[in-house]
Amino acid sequence: MEKRSKVILKSGKDQSVLRRHPWLFSGAIKKIIGNPSEGDVVEVFNNKDELIAVGHYQIGSITIRILHFGDAVVDDAFWFEKISEAFRLRKEIGVFDSDNTNVYRIVNAEGDNLPGLIIDYYNGNVVMQIHSIGMYNARKSILSALERIYDNKIITLYDKSENTLPFKGSVDAKSEFILGDASNAVVSEYGLKFHVNWVHGQKTGFFIDQRENRRLLMKYSKNRNVLNVFCYTGGFSVYAVQGGANMVHSVDSSSKAIDLVNENMKLNYPQANHQAFAVDAFKYMEGIQNKYDLIVLDPPAFAKHHNVLHNALQGYKRLNQQALEQISSGGILFTFSCSQVVSKENFRKSVFAAAVNAKRNVRILHQLNQPADHPVNICHPEGEYLKGLVLYVN
Ligand code: SAH
């Protein structure tokens, strides 16, 4: 094994490691023995010279992403075991080998004890998004683990890390095919069909994390007039039709997304009473008084950093107020935030403020989150990014 650099923590700064938090910040480090390059596996020692973890070294405020608490050799066998563990969970929760669903997340970064690594599965095709140089350097081992796990049946492995890696200059990463060359597929989610294009689409191509929430929406859709705002490829819209909606309108500012909504609707329900509009959400919602009795608000992350938290909360308030003021009596609002820095409590407070301003009687029917194939490591609460409320509005 090549010699690994040693990172020695300041006295008391091993607390977060004892609490099994996977990140170590630069301020916790007393000294580094050796000269690690970005992405190298390093050893972490406490102030008593005890080895307490191994992790990926990174330049930046999160200096180490822990791969293992205690000592470990990080080789092909290590990666195979870690990814197999993530895979076993997908078997447990029933997304692997399901009759009607062939789209799911295989690896959810810290939630699967693999910090910086996202892997999604699209009907035989695998898409990776990597957030650390260490994980990027491990791509070959990750690929061979996946090939073993899927018995060499992976059609395509696409690495889409060009825009997710930090300091990408240092590895000059380009998004690329590592195996195969398919850029799109039709996937099935609870029997509904969706076109997914991982090369041109947003994120890895599809918002897999809304699967269970879309399914819940289906139950509330019967005979309702539905507005799906920030619809992207129309997941909620198709489920609304499946649930018996009277009419469905989809809104997204991206005209490419609107084309995809229409395609996905055609794939499932060519005769649906559905229309899609490529317009700004805030603008569209200025004139929807009493037109809808089921509204979905699933905006992009309004805050990517803590310093813009206040503006983000104002954004959620404004958006929800528009919907709450105008939704018909007896209406149902599905409202979401996918900003990691916005806590469940803060989001709820924004929606509460919106309800007060809108002067409506609002009751919470459900509190939603991300599905089981996006697990949250209990030691890493930052991983809980998706939150939603289902509201009954009089
Ligand atoms: N609900 C979707 C995912 C939404 S992603 C699903 O289940 O798949 C957020 C979407 O908001 C993106 O498609 C983006 O194009 C759109 N968007 C961003 N800003 C917008 C705006 N101001 N008005 C309308 N749509 C917007």
Image (cartoon, rainbow, N blue to C red):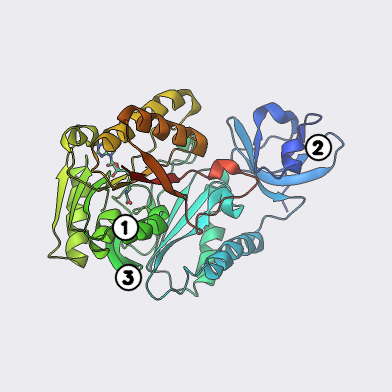
Compute the Cα span from label 2 to label 1. 54 Å
Q: Nearer the viewer, residue 73 or 281?
A: 281
- Where's the N terminus, which quadrant? bottom right
Kind of residue at disc 2: Asn
- Frontmost residue, 119 versus 328: 328
Which image quarter: residue 216?
bottom left
x, y percentage for residue 192?
29, 67
Q: From mark 3 to mark 1, how far is it between C-alphas?
A: 18 Å
- Residue 283 makes an appearance in the image: yes
Disc 2 crowd, CA 10 A, few/some/many (<14, 14-19, 20+): many
Where 391 falls versus 80 (above or below)?
above
The disc at residue 46 is 2
Q: Earlier in the sequence, mark 2 or mark 1?
A: 2
Dot 3: few (<14), some (14–19), or many (≥20) neighbours within 10 Å?
A: few
Residue 343 can be seen, yes or no: no
- The answer as to whether callout 2 falls within 8 Å of ligand 1 is no
Picture quadrant where residue 57 is located? top right
Residue 392, horizontal then vertical, whole percent:
35, 46
- Labels 3 & 1 near each other (Cβ < 8 A): no
> Is residue 259 depicted above or below 65 in this figure?
below
Asked if ligand 1 lies within 8 A of label 3, the reply is no
Identify the mark at residue 191; answer none if there is no mark: 3
Query: In the rendering, at what x and y percent does residue 47 appear?
Result: 83, 33
Local SS, label 1: helix
Disc 3 or disc 1, which is closer to the eye? Answer: 1
Which circle's residue, 3 or 1, is located before the other in the chain?
A: 3
Residue under numbered circle 1: 220
Q: Residue at x 32, y 31 (%)?
A: 359
* 59, 269: nearer the viewer: 269
Which of discs 3 and 2 lies nearer the camera? The answer is 3
Count residues near mark 1 (Cα–Cα under 10 Å), then give few for <14, some for 14-19, many for 20+: some
